[in-house]
Structures are given as structure tokens and as C-alpha cells.
Image (cartoon, grey):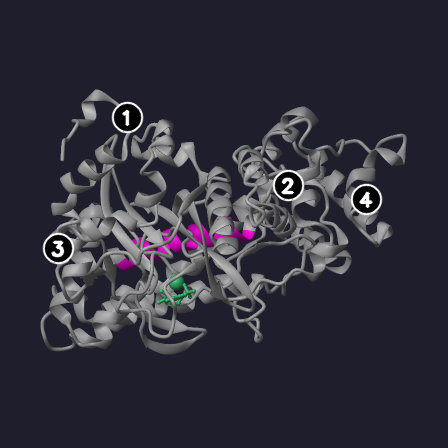
Amino acid sequence: MSFSPRSTGLLQSIEQVQAALSQTREEAFAQLGPAFLTRLPATPLPAPYAAGFSAQTAALLGFDPALAQDPGFADFFCGNTTRAWPPEALPYASVYSGHQFGVWAGQLGDGRALNLGEISHDGQRYELQLKGAGRTPYSRMGDGRAVLRSSIREYLCSEAMHHLGIPTTRALCVIGSDQTVWRETQESTAVVTRVAPSFVRFGHFEHFAANDLPTELQALADHVIARFYPACTQADDPYLALLQAVVEATADLLAQWQAVGFCHGVMNTDNLSLLGLTIDYGPFGFMDGFDAGFICNHSDTQGRYAYRQQPQAAYWSLFRLAQALLPLFGRQYPETGREERVIEDAQRVLETFKTRFGPALAARIQAKLGLATTQPGDTALVERLFEIMQASRADFTLTFRHLARLAKRPPADASADAPVRDLFLDRAACDAWLTEYRTRLASETRDDAARANAMNQVNPRYVLRNHLAQNAILRAEEQDFSEMERLAAVLRHPFDEQPGQEAYAALPPDWAATLTVSCSS
Ligand code: AMP
Ligand code: MG
């Protein structure tokens, strides 16, 4: 196998990608050893073809877009070539456990994901993971596959979230196949290549804690600290500092989700990232009409992960993470009384979720409303807006986007307010709120144009609405991937006006209300 040094430029061939993967293998998560993972080749996928390719994610990895033209591209990124890899270099599935819907589920793991290894580029390292590459020792009853529908949703949403500025795993490509699997119906399968600095989840820690493996637990924590939170090593208690860092990253992530109306759908502890990345796109959804109780996951009958519950669900999961890390805390304390002090410390750190999340979200909402200053009545103003949005199921994305166009002074012609007013069934309630909002805006020195400009940088015009994803999926199922790439291109500039693309910013059609997305993916 020939190896081209990275200094010669971007990787253009599969051979070069393979060589680059081999080069960084020594320092990967895989070095933690066999208690953490199982190496195995992917299950062969018949007649694979490239369905989608993100040049943006490729650039992150130092891959030339020409890579997608390599005749071996589809075979490589569905895992077909891994059968020829030497045993010590085979891809691996990692083991984790977790709480699903609030209940301890025991051992889970990468049941359909295989890690190819790491790529190092521009001083950053990224793990490459094939999702849907076949069964692993952690598949339980699953078939190890992912369907084309969900793979496209993951591909599109990873791109959308990243370009909204929200931390997320990325997607490099989608490889399709005519192989089918059974979900609610027969569906074709696909493999999506995901990219992230790390795929470590809360559940990885829960696994080693639950199995009473303190050495492995510590090794995992040390790996995460060394690679992603090196500042923790300076703290009195590095592991408590790790918890603090994850609390902060998670609180910030949740504030970002809430601020764009994103619902994850399955916030189980095995689907929460140690790095505060949005991970495991399944039955996620961006809200159309605002409903604080919005449940995007059809399988979530109790609404555990409803929009308004998400921050609480994150806090609950952090509590589980803290519990898993407990054996590592408090080494600086003498033996006697250590346990009490450790529990107190952990509780204190967990409480900072609330003091971090609340202000983080408030700051985002303030920016969404174009308020450059904070004033006493602001909380009430925001609450009343969400009340009338809720009552009218006003479109979440468009309400904020259209507010940017509102003139500070009441217009002579009331029709100037139509873009916002028309989103509300109860026009009188909308008018009353707009009057209040204008009074508030009058106390700001910024002019309308400057405020509009600032608001348009935080209120997206384009989000991955369910019906947009569905349109792309229906076309892709007919082997036409142009709509998917068109949509991806629009979502890469969510804050820009993009003349000609208005249809992607429009209210959802009536049929969108009948779309359901479940855990089955
Ligand atoms: P999720 O909540 O969908 O991210 O997945 C929960 C667990 O089920 C994880 O351990 C997954 O790896 C596993 N899983 C989900 N779907 C499949 C599948 N089709 N085959 C094997 N394992 C799966
Ligand atoms: Mg998962």
C-alpha cells in the first residue's frame, strides 16, 4: 500500500484515504483495548452506489471532492473492502450501555456502526464511522442496517445543524444499495459515513460503572480528558472538572436546540455525546407551528422528549453520567468522609446546568428578538410571545424571521405587518403583542436596518422541515438524488435570503401534518 504524505495536498483516492487511516490508528479510541470494542469487518453490501457526498465534510478531512469519483468509493464507504484488512486494523464496534426512556437498558453498543479509524487534518483528528454497515456483537435483535430514508435524514440534518452553528457529528456520504430490510414496510438500506472528533457517549461511562470496572472507567475518562478536555488535568479533581465541562457543553447545546425549535426525539443516555455534539439522528424534527409540547418521535408516547422537556431530559442524563463517574471523584480527599464530599461536589456541579442553560437560552431569545440590551420586562415579553405563538401554532422559524422586518414605528399602513400577523390565527393577540414589542424596541438605540441585520444572523430562514426531507427521500427512493443535494445546498446557508429558493422557506403543506417519524430507522 503506497502512502502519500499529507503535505502533498488533499487526498484524492481511496488508496490514500486508507493509508491515512492506518497512519493515525495508534492513537485512536481503539487503543483503550478489547474491553471497549470488538474488531470485525463490515457485512458485504450488494451493488453499492454513491447517493450523496458532502464536499464540505470532505474538506474538513482534507479529502479532495474528486475522491467521490474514485471507482472504489462506494465499496469503501459501505465497508465492503474491510474484509481484506489485516485483523489488527479491522474496523471496530464499541460497547456502551444506557438508560432508554428513563429505564436502565443494560448493555447496548454500536449495533450497526463500525469505526474505520481516524483522519488527521489541519491539526484536528476525526473519527470515521460507517452507520448501517451490518451486524456487530452489540446488535441484539437488530439487523445492523440503516434504511435509505433515515440515512438521508441524518445526512441532511448533520449538514443543516452544522451550518446553523450547532455542534453536531457530520456526514461525509451516503452509500445506497438495492438490498432491502423490513421496518414498518420493506425499505432499501444505506450506509452513512459519520465524522466526529469522538463518538463517546454518556452510555460508555455508564457501561463501565455498571459492570464495576473502575480501571476501564478511569482509562476512558483519561482518554476523553487527554484528547478533548486537557484543561481538566489542571483541576484539583480532573474527573469532577470533566463532569463540569460536559455539563457546560450540554447546557449550551440544549440552549441552541431550543432556540431553533429542534427536537432530538431520543435523548437516551446512549445518544448523548461527551463533547456536547448533536448525535444519532433518528426521529428528530424541527418544529413548524410552535407547540411547547411538540413530540417529534411517534414512538415517544409519553412525551418524555417533547420540546419543552428536552432541557430536563439533558439534566437527568447528566445526573446519570455523574453517577457513573462517582467512583473517580474525590481522590484528593482523605478516606473518611470522602463519599459525602464527593456527592456534594457532584450535586454542585450538576446544579450549574441550570445556571448555565437558563441564561444561555435567554441570551439567544434576546438576540432572536433583536434586543441589544436587557430590561426588566423582557422575560414577560418573551413569555407572552410564546403564549400567543402556542395559541395560534404560529410557525416557529417564520415568526422570528419575519419579526426582523417589523418597523420600530407603527406603520401608517397596517398591511406592512402582514408577514408576521398572517402567522397568527388570533390577529388581535398578535397586534397587542406587536404594540408591546414596538414599545420595547423604542428604548433601543439601534435602527431598524441594523436590528434586522443582527436578527437575520440568528434567526434562520431555512431549516430542515420534515416535509422537505420527505420530498428529498421520495425522489431518492426513485434513484434521483438531485433534490437531496439541492436541499443540502440550501441548508448550508440557512441565514441567507437565497432568492429563488423561497419554496424551501415556506410554511409546510397540509400533508406535512400527517408525516410521522418513529424510532424505527
Ligand atoms: P438508537 O436509540 O436508535 O440510537 O439505538 C439504540 C441501540 O440499538 C443502539 O445500541 C444501536 O446500535 C442499536 N440499534 C438500532 N438500530 C439497530 C439495527 N438496525 N441493528 C442493530 N442495532 C441497532
Ligand atoms: Mg443511538
Residue shown at 75% from the left, 38% from the top? 438
Q: Of residues 239 and 193, which is closer to you in this image? A: 193
Of tags 4 and 2, the one toward the viewer is: 4
Q: Position of residue 125 (x, y in %)?
A: 24, 40
Q: Is residue 126 above or below residue 428?
A: above
User: Do the numbered discs 3 and 1 sit on residues whose CB atoms are within 8 Å?
Assistant: no
Residue 193, visible in the rendered structure: yes
Q: What's the amino acid at mark 3?
A: Pro
**Residue labelled with disc 1:** 10
Q: Image quadrant of residue 102?
A: bottom left
Where does residue 117 sit, x and y in percent of width and height? Answer: 22, 47
Of labels 3 and 4, earlier in sequence is 3
- Work out which residue is located at the far front of the displayed protein and give it: 47
Q: Nearer the viewer, mark 3 or mark 4?
A: 3
Quadrant of the image where one finds ligand 2: bottom left
Mark 3–mark 1 distance (CA, rounded to whole Å): 28 Å
**Coordinates of residue 434 in the picture (x, y in percent):** 78, 43
CA neighbours of label 2 inside 10 A, class few (<14), some (14 to 19), many (20+): many
Magenta segment range? 243-258
- Do the residues bearing badges 4 and 1 touch, measured as CB atoms within 8 Å? no
Sequence-first disc among 4 and 1: 1
> Which residue was labeled with disc 3?
87
Q: Nearer the viewer, residue 326 or 362?
A: 326
Q: Is residue 19 magenta?
A: no
Tell me the CA gap for discs 4 and 2: 16 Å
Residue 414 is situated, as x and y percent measured from the top left of the image, at: 88, 36
In percent of the image, x 21 and y 70: which residue is there? 208
